[in-house]
Image (tube, rainbow, N blue to C red):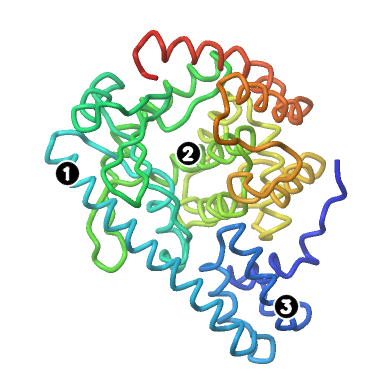
Amino acid sequence: MKPLVIPAEMPLIQLLRVALGRSDQLDKPLSNADWVALLEVARKQTLTGVLMEGIKRLPVGQQPDTEAMFQWLAAAERTKQSSRRLNRAAVQICERLERDGVPAVVLKGQGVSMLYDEPLTRTPGDIDLWIGGGRKRIVAYIRHYFPNESVVYHHMDFPVFKKISVEAHFTPSWMYSPLTNRRLQQWFQGQWAHELANRVSLPEGTGTVSISTTAFNRVYIALHIYRHLLDEGVGLRQVLDYYHVLNSDENTEASSSERSESIRVLCSLGMKRFMGALAWVMCELFSLDDNKQLFKPDPKEGAFLLNEIMQAGNFGKYDVRFAHEQIGDTHFRRFVRKQQRNLHFLAHYPSEVLWHPLWRIWHFFWRRMNGYQ
């Protein structure tokens, strides 16, 4: 493993701690060049809006000069405008689905942002909808409007907007191991009605939608990070989401039986080692209180996970260790590339890594047999 960058020495982590109220200032003032470089790192980790809140909290002598401040303000304002645009789109599509008798829950982004002190500062991605009714019904509904859309195991694209990506999920996530995937899908089915009933108003009076609950997100956001780590690469934005889940009043006030149930589910999915790593990252980066953690921190596994986070960035776009998808790639090339990358995780998460090639082969023929390609 490459030498680990110590987070406490990184201005990015120091500023993030200030933004979260975990610190009052940086270790030392930054030069104008440092602020410009830090902005580039913040963009790679999709944290410009959140870190701008940290800049506002810094002592005057530690804030960037006028030129750099304008660059940060402009980047943060773009984040807020994007958040507003996606919030409006989420309300529009959910209202349309509701009128058509197709119930939907907004996963991740627009829902998790409500746990942030300033929800609009969270950099949005796309709109992920968990739609009820079963795969066949959802595919038929979407293909009525967009007949050429392909389908994968857990979702299909729903291109109702020109510049905003919408994914229609039949199920929120999956596992490569058949046994753990069966357990996961059974758990999801048992949560559906409760999640659909969780209605909230999005910021600035945008409208009301169903979003996933904190109890659901204790499992789901951790699983989402796990999937990103194994499939593409995970950045600080996803990890920060889970910090807000664990640091929320709802998690703090949850009964011991509720928290024990989340732990039971995560262990049943074979994620205990990963959760120990994630707990250490929560402690190392954010100084999260022990009483809010679900698992005991594992320093060795945590160091490995943190190194992956810092090197990969959002969706692994900036990871120079592995080849990235290229135009004209064949199914076989993508398969081989995924296998090469996954071997990097074999010693840490063997079950998912070893089941991955078999699942990929099954998935290829399953899509072909069902007309989903």
The residue at which mark 3 appears reads as 26
Q: Provide residue 269's location: percent of width, then percent of height.
A: 58, 25
Q: Residue type at mark 1?
A: Arg
Mark 1 or mark 2: which is in front? 1
Residue 154's label in the rendered image is none
Q: Which residue is drawn at 32% across and 61% down?
A: 85
The residue at which mark 2 appears reads as 258
C-alpha distance separating marks 1 and 2: 34 Å
Q: Residue type at mark 2?
A: Glu
Give above or below for 40 relative to 366.
below
Residue 96's label in the rendered image is 1
Mark 3 or mark 1: which is in front? 1
Q: How crowded is mark 3: few (under 14 residues within 10 Å), some or many (20 or more)?
A: many
Q: Residue type at mark 3?
A: Leu
Label 3 secondary element:
loop
C-alpha distance separating marks 3 and 1: 47 Å
Between residue 366 and residue 28, name the one nearer to us.
366
- Residue 22 relative to residue 124: left or right: right
Q: Which of marks 3 and 1 is nearer the N terminus?
A: 3
As drawn, the residue found furthest toward the left would be 99
Q: Which of marks 3 and 2 is nearer the N terminus?
A: 3
Q: Residue at x 74, y 83 (%)?
A: 31
Give above or below for 202 relative to 194.
below
Q: Which residue is drawn at 41% across and 48% down?
A: 126
Q: Earlier in the sequence, mark 1 or mark 2?
A: 1
